[in-house]
Image (cartoon, rainbow, N blue to C red):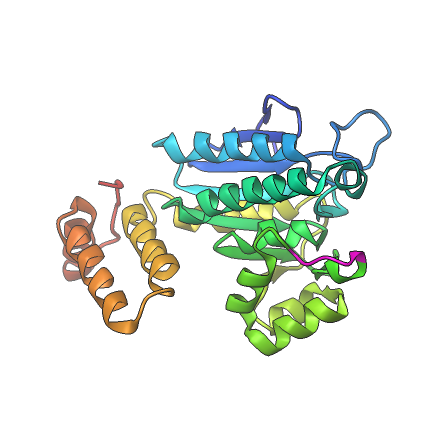
Amino acid sequence: MSLELEAMPNNLVNYGVTENGIAIIELSSDSDGKPLTDGKTPVNTYTREMWEDIDTAILNARFDDKVTVILVTGKGNNFFSAGASINYLNSLSPRYKYFFCLHANETLSRLEQTPKLVIAALNGHTVGGGLEIAMAADMRIARKNAGKLGLPEINLGVLAGTGGTARLTRLIGKAKALELMVTGELISFEDGDDMNLVNQIFDSDAGDFRRDVLDWAGQFTLPNKAVKAVGNIKRSVQSGIELPLEYHLALERELQSDLFQSNDAKEGIAAYVNKKVANFTGE
């Protein structure tokens, strides 16, 4: 990939935007959650400082009108993210740990509520807090045979406190989610695909995986998709799932009414009638 990514202030996340409007958020740290130095393997564990960098990158993507898709991935070929740095957590007071989790919750909610499609590219092991980050994305694309998934916090005597218990239950159902969390079992990407935790698995070489995901994600960018419609669909799904059906239907109607007034809806309907390919502008 020729795109040069820029380091965020704490040097724990790299960020850049492709020509077709895909923002890349790349997690980048060693096993202690510190910036990578020569000879260190990217494990992409997080600390408070990494969350600050993630938050900055999310806001950059949210406010950039050129960005229509956000891609979250890990540096290297072995880990998407191994979650929180255990050495870092061990140095914190219980009260500090609480605010650490709160900050992470708020950051992932910001990602989840951003009206742009978010794709997690699982380039390697995605465990603990790493899976919690991935589950806040709208879609998860994994590289075949590249790693494991799971929430093994039970082995530390704690739970997955950065949205893990909530999001895993909503994604795969109560019984299976509970089983995975109380056993701490790590599963393959293929098993994750079977239980709808992973959307797709790409049979890509390590060096080609990110390029392949970017190529695939391009279908959701302008002029291929009406990105305002994508954002409204996302809002209906994310917010509506927590509402009674009648209120969800009311939300859906309001979002549809908003889209009917857009130029892209006029373009899409006219293109269909005239048997042409729509050329969406995002307006």
Q: Quadrant of residue 200?
A: bottom right
Specify the principal SS of the magenta part: loop
| Residue under the point 60% across and 73% down | 195
Farthest-out residue, top: 9
Q: Where is residue 98 in the image (x, y as percent from the top left)?
A: 62, 44
Q: Position of residue 4 (x, y in %)?
A: 59, 25
Is 189 situated above or below 95? below
Examine the structure image and report whether residue 170 is included in the region drawn in magenta.
Answer: no
| Residue under the point 70% across and 47% down | 83
Q: Nearer the viewer, residue 52 or 77?
A: 52
Q: In this view, does 199 lie to the left or right of 181?
A: left
Is 280 situated above or below 235? above
Question: Which quarter of the rendering shows the N terminus?
Answer: top right
| Residue under the point 34% across and 48% down | 224
Question: Which quarter of the rendering shows the C terminus?
Answer: top left
Is 169 situated above or below 211? below
Farthest-out residue, right: 39
| Residue under the point 74% across and 35% down | 33
Q: How many labels does the image show?
A: 0
Q: In this view, does 196 lie to the left or right of 21?
A: right
Q: In which quarter of the image is residue 76?
A: top right
Q: Where is residue 168 in the image (x, y as percent from the top left)?
A: 57, 64
Q: In this view, does 223 lie to the left or right of 30?
A: left
Q: In this view, does 41 lie to the left or right of 202?
A: right
Q: Position of residue 238 (x, y in %)?
A: 39, 58
Q: In which quarter of the image is residue 150?
A: bottom right
What span is colored magenta in the figure?
A: 156-160
